[in-house]
Image: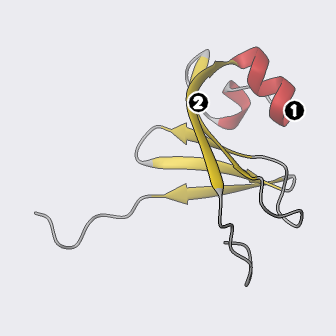
Amino acid sequence: MAGKETCSAPTFDSKTITNDEVVKRVGSSIKSLGIPSDKVDVILLACKAKDNFPAQTIVLRLPGNKALILWEGVFLELERSKNLFLP
C-alpha cells in the first residue's frame, strides 16, 4: 500500500545477497548500513500490476528485530515491536 493505492498482485523474493550486490542495488555497503556481516537477508518486493509503484523495493534485515527498507531512494528503519499478547 502506498498512500491510498494498493497493489493487487505483489511479488516477494526472499534471499541472501552479498555486499557487492547490496552496493549495486542501493549504493551503500553492508557495513555502512550497520550490518556486521558480508551477507544480508533481503526481501525484494515488486508490484507488476501498477505503474505508480516503485519498480522494486528492497527490505534488508538488521540485527535485533529491525530492518531497513529502501523506498524511492530513501532508507526507512523498521522495528518489530513487542507482541503485547505474548509473554
Element type at marker 1?
loop
Residue sitting farthest toward the bottom: 4
- Is 26 left or right of 4, judged from the image as shown? right
Could you tell which of marks 2 and 1 lies nearer the N-terminus?
A: 1
Q: Position of residue 34 (x, y in %)?
A: 62, 35
Task: Report the residue at 82% width, 36% height from top.
Answer: 26
Q: Position of residue 35 (x, y in %)?
A: 59, 30
Q: Residue at x 69, y 26 (%)?
A: 30
| Front residue of this view, candidates 66 and 45 | 45
Q: Name the one closer to the observer, 24 or 48.
A: 48
Q: Which residue is mark 2?
A: 35
Residue 68: image x %, image y %? 63, 48
**Disc 2 to disc 1: CB gap under 8 Å:** no
**Looking at the picture, which amino acid does disc 1 mark?**
Gly
Residue 87's disc number: none
15 w.r.t. 54: above or below:
above
Disc 2 marks a residue whose amino acid type is Ile
Reply above or below: 66 against 9.
above
Q: Quadrant of residue 77?
A: bottom right
Residue at image mark 1: 27
- Nearer the viewer's eye, disc 2 or disc 1? 1
User: Residue drawn at (82%, 62%), measured in percent from left and top?
Assistant: 53
